[in-house]
Amino acid sequence: KGYQKDDEGWMQMFEQLKEYKQKHGDCIVPQKYEVNPKLGIWVRTQRMMYHHTQTEKTTGMTDERIHKLEEIGFVWNASYMRHKRNDEGWMRMFKE
């Protein structure tokens, strides 16, 4: 039963992430997202759990959850994407 309740909570947050993506065009939610602080923390937690699964630590991250997140374009290394986005913006300004 614990997993079922956990799955419900996870799916609610996943739906909020999908709404964020519709609005912002990506899944890179700031850690301190003032509009929905819980979502920023949840996204950070998903990344941490994913990285722990890569080092064979046991987490609540399942293959199904990884697949669902990847289907909507979830980025596991957000700091890389943030820098890339900043670089692209800088290059656009530089060219103008």
Image (cartoon, rainbow, N blue to C red):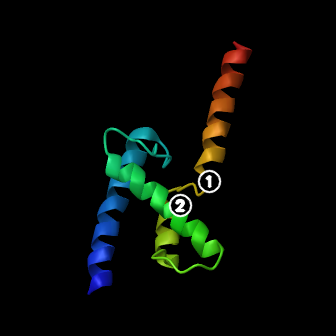
Question: Which quadrant of the figure has residue 5?
Answer: bottom left
Given residues 84 and 22, the one toward you in this image is 84
Kind of element beneath mark 2: helix
* Res. 70 visible in picture: no
Which residue is at a point 49% across and 77% down the rendered structure image? 59
Mark 2 near mark 1, Cβ–Cβ under 8 Å? yes
Q: What residue type is disc 2 on? A: Arg
Residue 40 location in percent, x, y? 41, 49
Of the 4 image quadrants, the one containing the N terminus is: bottom left
Q: What residue type is disc 1 on? A: Asn
**Would you name the residue on which mark 1 appears?**
77
Which residue is at a point 71% across and 24% down the rendered structure image? 91
Which residue is at a point 49% across and 45% down the rendered structure image? 26
Given residues 82 and 45, the one toward you in this image is 45
Which residue is at a point 73% across and 16% down the rendered structure image? 95
Q: What is the crowding at mark 1: few (fewer than 14 residues within 10 Å), some, or many (at least 20)? A: few
Mark-to-mark CA distance, 2 and 1: 8 Å
Residue 65 location in percent, x, y? 46, 72
**Would you name the residue on which mark 2 appears?**
47
Q: Is residue 71 above or below residue 7?
A: above
Residue 15 location in percent, x, y? 33, 58
List the single residue furthest toward the bottom: 1
Q: What is the crowding at mark 2: few (fewer than 14 residues within 10 Å), some, or many (at least 20)? A: some
Kind of element beneath mark 1: loop
List the single residue furthest toward the front: 57
The mark total stands at: 2
> In the visual, does 9 lie left or right of 25?
left
Given residues 94 and 31, the one toward you in this image is 31
Given residues 61 and 20, the one toward you in this image is 61
* Res. 79 visible in picture: yes
On residue 59, the disc is none
